[in-house]
Amino acid sequence: MSITIREIQPHDNAAMAVIIKTSLEEFGLNIPGTAYFDESTNHLYDAFQIKGSKYYVAIENNEVIGGVGIYPSNGLPADTVELVKMYLAPASRGKGLGKTLMQKCITLAGELGYHHIYLESMPELAAAVTAYEKLGFKLLDKPVGDTGHYSCSIWMLYQIKP
């Protein structure tokens, strides 16, 4: 079985919305101030049509099994992009796919001229936070920008190597 990573297509919207929402439900995070209630969660393809953004999906056996994107969220410095909506189906976790997806976003962010990648998370997603730290993301004391995810209490920043 091989996994293909490609840019999101309109027909991927429903599958990614299910992965995001069921993942948040799994951790009891289907609460306001999270991606669960973002309008864009149901329309990822459309949301990622703006300049400086891109969303990747991972496909196995013609089925969407996860995704992640970068997005120039409101209020971020011009040289910073946000790593957003990083979710994998439960059976696809713990196999290095998340790392592969994040590295693809880091490479793209550098190619697009960004110097930093910002992300927000929650203590309930400890495995993800550990993965971010292993990639080189550093904890911040407060949020950056205006993402609308006021329920997030973990903020991290990655410095892209020049």
Image (cartoon, grey):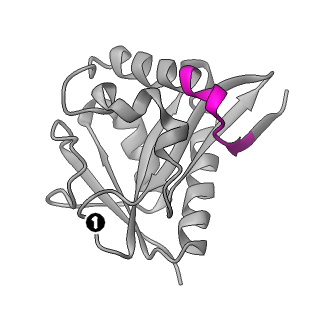
At 34% from the left and 15% from the top, the residue drawn is 25
* 78 shown above or below 7: below
Q: Nearer the viewer, residue 143 or 94?
A: 143
**Left or right: where 126 falls relative to 92:** left
At 25% from the left and 53% from the top, the residue drawn is 155
Graded by Cα atoms within 10 Å as few (under 14), some (14 to 19) or many (20 or more), the crowding at tag 1 reads: some
* 58 shown above or below 48: above
* Quadrant for the N terminus in the image: top right
The reply to whether residue 65 is in sight is: no
At 18% from the left and 26% from the top, the residue drawn is 32
The reply to whether residue 19 is in sight is: yes
Q: Nearer the viewer, residue 124 or 148?
A: 148
Label tally: 1
At 55% from the left and 20% from the top, the residue drawn is 14
Q: Nearer the viewer, residue 125 or 15?
A: 15
Which stretch did the figure color magenta? 5-14
- The residue pinned by badge 1 equals 76
